[in-house]
Image: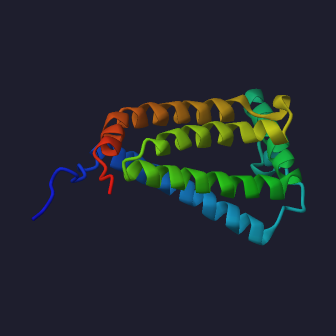
Amino acid sequence: MKNYFFQKKRTPPLLMILCILTLISTSLTLLGGVVSLLFGPTKEKQSLTLAYKLPNDANPDLVDSLEQLDIFLGAINEHFYFYNFASILLASIGIIAVQKMLSGKSLGFHLYIIYSIISIAQYYILIPISEIPSFYIITNLAFSIFYIFLYSLNLKWMNNQIENENPF
């Protein structure tokens, strides 16, 4: 005789899509961190403005943005090992959060919020605020808020899974 009272409800499609996208992103971050650690920090200082061979009449805003990005990447390279270990740890937290949400636990949602906040804040730990490109932080913050909002639409389903869990 089957007990249908504790049967788990089907995962909502939106949650499944978000989790797949997050898993792709966090897995690539994890893989990138591991590969970076294998190859080590860059030893040569190469300017992005020289790498792209910008003409003299290039847009000054573009040149400023590339110079700011140069400083940013140089600062990350100075803290190479800490940055990559932190990225691997944060990606692991993101993967655990997704796994928890897929299994219907709202703890995963809260872990995802922590993962999002810390992954943005890690730059402020390593790099002076003036050297962080604002477009980089604004873009990451916008994506994080958007994903948190979309994940929050599935909180009701996650909370129902906890209520319907088999206590035995």
User: Looking at the picture, does residue 153 appear above or below residue 92?
Assistant: above
Name the colouring of the figure: rainbow
Image quadrant containing the C terminus: bottom left
In the image, taking residue 7 as reference, residue 39 lies left or right, namely: right
Is 70 in front, or is 35? 35
Can residue 122 be seen at all in this image of the molecule? yes
Residue 56 can be seen in this image: no
Query: Which one is in front, 142 or 92?
Result: 92
Q: Residue at x 53, y 55 (%)?
A: 95
Q: Residue at the location (60% across, 43% down)? A: 115
- Residue farthest along the bottom direction in this orientation: 38
Figure check: 168 above or below 159: below
Q: Position of residue 97 (x, y in %)?
A: 51, 49
Residue 93 rendering spot, x and y as whole percentages: 59, 52
Q: Is residue 4 depicted above or below 12 in this figure?
A: below
Q: Is residue 8 above or below residue 153?
A: below
Question: For the point 86% across and 34% down, which residue is it?
Answer: 128
In terms of image quadrants, where is residue 62?
top right
Left or right of 165, for residue 63: right
Q: Position of residue 155 (x, y in %)?
A: 37, 35
